Image (cartoon, rainbow, N blue to C red):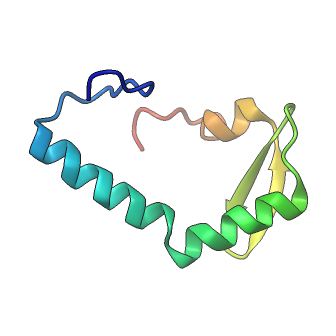
Amino acid sequence: MKGSPIRLKQKLSPKAAAAKKIRDKKAAMSSARKRKKAENQRLGQRSDSDLHHTGSMVKRVSIKNNRGNFGKGTKNE
């Protein structure tokens, strides 16, 4: 992975990294992710907020709340 612009936090063997790449690509191209991507493009992303997907609904929330698990923190997720 020398020369890759993406720095991985995980130190994986070449075999494990290749398997992860395949899994990640498959997840990114799933029908659910494609729907979410299309919806995000329709709604338009802004720099001051995140789009929070909850079931069948999407709402615009502050970045702090969305990435901080709405005050509960992310340590126990």
Q: Is residue 72 left or right of residue 60?
A: left
Task: Tell me if residue 10 can be seen.
Answer: yes
Residue 43 at x, y = what percent?
Answer: 89, 59
Q: Is residue 42 above or below residue 66?
A: below
In the picture shown, does residue 13 fall above or below 42?
above
Q: Quadrant of residue 55?
A: bottom right
Query: Measuring 49% from the left and 61% from the top, which residue is drawn there?
Result: 28
Q: Position of residue 41 (x, y in %)?
A: 82, 59
The one of 5 and 30 positioned closer to us in this rendering? 5
In the depicted view, which residue is nearer to us: 43 or 59? 43
Q: What x and y, as percent, mark residue 51? A: 77, 51
Q: Which quadrant is home to the N terminus?
A: top left
Q: Look at the image and tell me in which quarter the C terminus lies.
A: top left
**What's the residue at 72%, 53% (across, down)?**
52
- On the image, the x and y values in percent for residue 7 come to 38, 23
Q: Residue at x 72, y 76 (%)?
A: 56
